[in-house]
Amino acid sequence: MQPSLKPVPAPPAAHPPDLDCPNCGARANGKFCAHCGAETEVEVPSAGEFLHEFVGHYVAIEGKLPKTLQRLMFRPGQLTVDYLHGRRMAYISPLRLYLTLSLVVFALIRLVGVELPHLTIEGDSVGATYQHSVAKRTATLYINISDGEEARTSGETIGGALQALGKVNDKWGHNLQQFMSEPAAEKSAILNHGFLAYLPYMLVGALPLFALYLKLIYRGTGRRYGEHLVFALHANAFAFLLASLMIVLPGNVVWLAACLHAGAFQLISAWDCLQLIPFLWLILYLPAAMRRVYAGGRLATAGRWLLLIASHVLVISAMTIAAELIGIVMHH
């Protein structure tokens, strides 16, 4: 009779030694701290991991992006409705979406370039020269903005504002005197540089004001300011998206408007007319989004839309002038 063989028990599994969590200092048994959730094995991240973190957390290039952009572009206001009703996991958050698309448009402005009119003063006339490539040639168009008494009044107003700024700081005053002595071409370059340099701050500053206008024109709805801010983030994100499209497309809608104003129809190209599609899409998008989020009849929505646009354009214009003034007194 053969003796029965008893199974030899396996040696006990080795447990990782207790470690002090590098984040909170608590005793941790394993790869993660039970107290704060931090990793206990600290390794220096690779360049690829740094890039993945940047893309995932700041640029929002992830699985949610296509669905978010599809909903943003083709269903005006639906992202706001979903967010306010708690349907948020399938989409990028409003703030991250806004920041992502703002980064895209500002990067395109730097990479592609944006043609800006150059302000000119000739006698009592205030105008702008605008250069644009049409049919592989560069055309220059002069647009008369104001003349006579209106130009003198505008000049006195701007001059008074500049003198007041010059008195605030000696350096500003010196820069102002230097600006006034520059030739017209250099003045235009300084103004356009100031506009591009302070454009991001201008738009970020206008965003909470946009939500405030909505709060005022929809004050009877009982909605909180935060709800209007969500709508403002989505609406401005869409504006950034369309602006990016208009930057990469050939043609220029501003040039089209300038040629129509001056009667220079021969300088208009088919690409300039193509720019009308995203431009009209941008105009029609906002009232459609307002109706979906806030309800209301078409006529009432149209009235609120006009009031909203007028207020926003007024503030953006004021901020643009402020950016130009800052560019003058801060230039070196």
Image (spheres, helix red, strand yellow):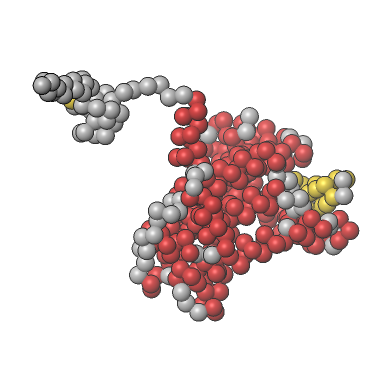
Can I make out residue 5 in this image?
Answer: yes
> Residue at coordinates 40% horizontally, 53% vertically from top-left?
89
Looking at the image, residue 144 lies above or below residue 326: below
Figure quadrant of residue 305:
bottom right
Looking at the image, residue 23 lies above or below residue 118: above
Can I make out residue 191 in this image?
Answer: no
Q: Is residue 92 left or right of residue 183?
A: left
Q: Where is residue 236 in the image (x, y as percent from the top left)?
A: 53, 55
> Residue at coordinates 74% horizontally, 36% vertically from top-left?
186
The residue nearer to you, when weighing 212 against 7, is 7
The residue nearer to you, when weighing 27 against 184, is 27
Q: How many marks?
A: 0
The residue nearer to you, when weighing 84 against 27, is 27
Q: Is residue 49 left or right of residue 306?
A: left
Q: Where is residue 82 in the image (x, y as percent from the top left)?
A: 42, 62
> Residue at coordinates 77% horizontally, 39% vertically from top-left?
185
Q: Where is residue 123 in the image (x, y as percent from the top left)?
A: 80, 49
Q: Where is residue 301 in the image (x, y as percent from the top left)?
A: 52, 74
Q: Quadrant location of the C terminus?
A: top right
Q: Quadrant location of the N terminus?
A: top left
Q: Residue furthest front?
A: 1
> Residue at coordinates 59% horizontally, 34% vertically from top-left?
330
Q: Is residue 241 left or right of residue 186?
A: left
